[in-house]
Amino acid sequence: MRFFHQVYVIAAKDLRAELRTKEAINAALAFALVILLMFSFAFDPQEETTREISGGLLWIVFAFAGTLVLNRSFAREQPNDCLDALIAAPIPPAALYLGKVAANFLLVLAVEMVSLPVFGIFYNVRWTAQFPELMLVVALGTWALTVIGTFFSALTVNIRLREVMLPMLTYPILVPALMGAMLLTSGLVMGKPIGPESAVWLRLLIGFDAIFTAVSVLLVETVLVG
Amino acid sequence: MSVVAVDGVWKFYGDYAALRDVRLEAAAGSCLALIGRNGAGKTTLLRTIAGFSRPGRGQVRIFGQEPRQAEARRRMGFIGHGIAVYDELSALENLVLFARLYGLADPRRAALEWLERTGLERVRNGLVREFSRGMRQRLAVARAFLHEPSVLILDEPFTALDDRAIAVLQRLLREALASGKTILMSTHQLREALDLASHVALLNRGQVAFQGAATPEMVSDPGYVYARYGEA
């Protein structure tokens, strides 16, 4: 119980700091909306093929915009050496990490929830047709993005080119989860429910989330303390 | 039993040995002033003792425990080069945050008490980014003392402090020593440090060149240790 309270304290601190400055969320939101708009110029929304790849386009936007949020996650601790104070506190590194993952998850999800209606309008898709299943896929895909991204945010926090390094490290590892989320989302926004064929991608997403959450929790102390 | 025991610690950055077979001990109620030129390894040693990085060889023990163990960290307070408080949060929010992380029973009460002790109670709801340098430093002191640590690890605590912050810190350190707490501090301000220190250790190129009790000669002439146990 105490562990989850520590996770909550870290997440609440990050959310409060972000909502005061709105540095990351404003940038991510503006970026997501601009990219959605630009893609809508590039692809004809009336064409069937556009709808078929719409899930892919959407997750590219989510992944790029999400990186802007994730880049700030540990970078926020650098001014005043705040990370030292967190590492010195008697909390498990896993609680620190999962608190940051939870805050990032909510911030990225907020960007996605604003982007989805805009996506529906620009690409002429009924994204609410399979709403609960779509939300499940969005949540699982976003968790994958934030778990991997937060881990590499910790790893690259002291690197001068961290804004470049974070996506370079995150995206290759994220490929299986992104593939699953893209394929599932494409079907769902076209009104097709998750069937036996696509369920394998859902299981892959769940497995990816479970495995990488466990691996990151195990490795985060080594990343933070060496 | 020593409160802090450093036993044969080496720390490497690539091939470079920043600490070489360092052995130190600090007993309960003592104040060890760690002195040495820039680059001697003082900050590396204090960060290793505080558990921010692991030694390449050797071991550090705080109350007989490895510094990364939660119980050791609960009993440790650290002031480093940064103030380690958040600019986007208020003074009260910062202290409540750390009080919660240290598992204090009443975080708000503890935070308010330390804001009062450091003279910041009137600006408790002000954002730290709006504070003067001296106020930020006093808040950093409050953050380090908030959970009543038994061991204080202070990396150049008097550097860049204003007069009021120096007075606050010296008063708190005297009170801490009087109540049996242990202090390890690195410093270039030898007069302020020797005023408090019961023991002195001189680091030279990652090695302990001298370690012993502070003597009247050192207090009257802060350059004495360097002259007597000088650096090659």
Image: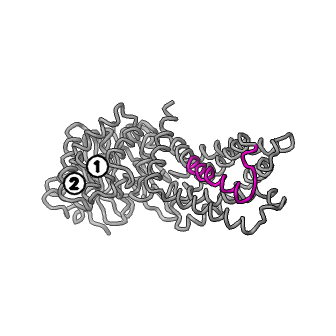
Report the magenta residues as a range.
A104-129
Q: Which residue is mark 2?
A: B165
* B16 w.r.t. A155: above or below: below
**Amino acid at pointer 1:** Val
Nearer to us in this view, B176 or A89: A89
Label 1 neighbourhood size at 10 Å, few (<14), some (14-19), many (20+)? many
Could you tell me if the residues under marks 1 and 2 are in contact, i.e. CB atoms within 8 Å?
yes
Residue pictured at 75% horizontal, 53% vertical:
A125
Left or right position of A126 against B59: right
**Amino acid at pointer 2:** Ala
Question: Is A121 a magenta residue?
Answer: yes
Q: Horizontal and vertical percent for residue B176? A: 23, 41
- Same-subunit check for callouts 1 and 2: yes
Instruction: Give the chain letter at badge 2.
Output: B
Q: Which mark is residue B141?
A: 1
Residue pictured at 29% horizontal, 55% vertical:
B136
Residue B149 visible in rendering: no
Residue pictured at 34% horizontal, 40% vertical:
B3
Instruction: Give the chain letter at badge 1.
Output: B
